[in-house]
Image (cartoon, grey):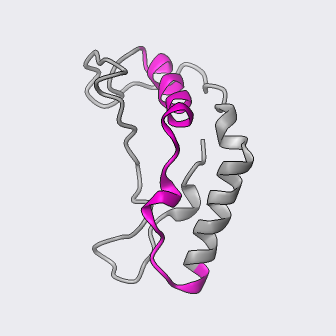
Amino acid sequence: MIKFKRRPQEPSVLRSSKVSRKKREIERCVRKGIKVPSEHFRLDRHESGQIRGTLWEHQEYKCCYCERKRELKRESDVEHYRPKSGIIEEPGRPGYWWLAYEW
């Protein structure tokens, strides 16, 4: 597994008003006990590109798990360490929604 030599600077998009709104919408859904719509966890291509590009560069252009060289445009998934919207093994538990958009 690739470990960062230094922590990369948080992409500015994660401090944007749009992300702040999304975080509030997620929290509102959780407090009301309703399922969080998947669009609350999505950013547009440009915004998510900032995040992916930063991680790709600091992971030495490799998958952080298997360390295989990868291409940003073809393999740009960002894996989640914890489920963001629900935990299958524990019905009713909402997942780790509060970690969405955390660097």
Up-down relation of residue 97 to residue 69 (above or below): below
Based on the picture, tell me whether residue 86 belongs to the magenta stretch: no
Q: Is residue 4 left or right of residue 64?
A: right
Looking at the rendered image, the quarter that the N terminus falls into is top left
The image shows residue 33 at horizontal and vertical percentages of: 52, 85
Main secondary structure of the magenta stretch: helix
Q: Is residue 101 left or right of residue 80?
A: right
Q: Quadrant of residue 61?
A: top left
* Residue at x 62%, y 58% (from the top left corner): 22
Based on the picture, tell me whether residue 51 belongs to the magenta stretch: yes
Up-down relation of residue 53 to residue 77 (above or below): above
Q: Is residue 22 left or right of residue 73?
A: right
Q: Is residue 6 left or right of residue 45?
A: right
Up-down relation of residue 24 to residue 41 (above or below): below
Instruction: Point out the stretch of residues depicted in magenta.
Output: 31-60
The image shows residue 79 at horizontal and vertical percentages of: 37, 42
Q: Quadrant of residue 15?
A: top right
Q: Quadrant of residue 31?
A: bottom right
* Residue at x 42%, y 66% (from the top left corner): 85
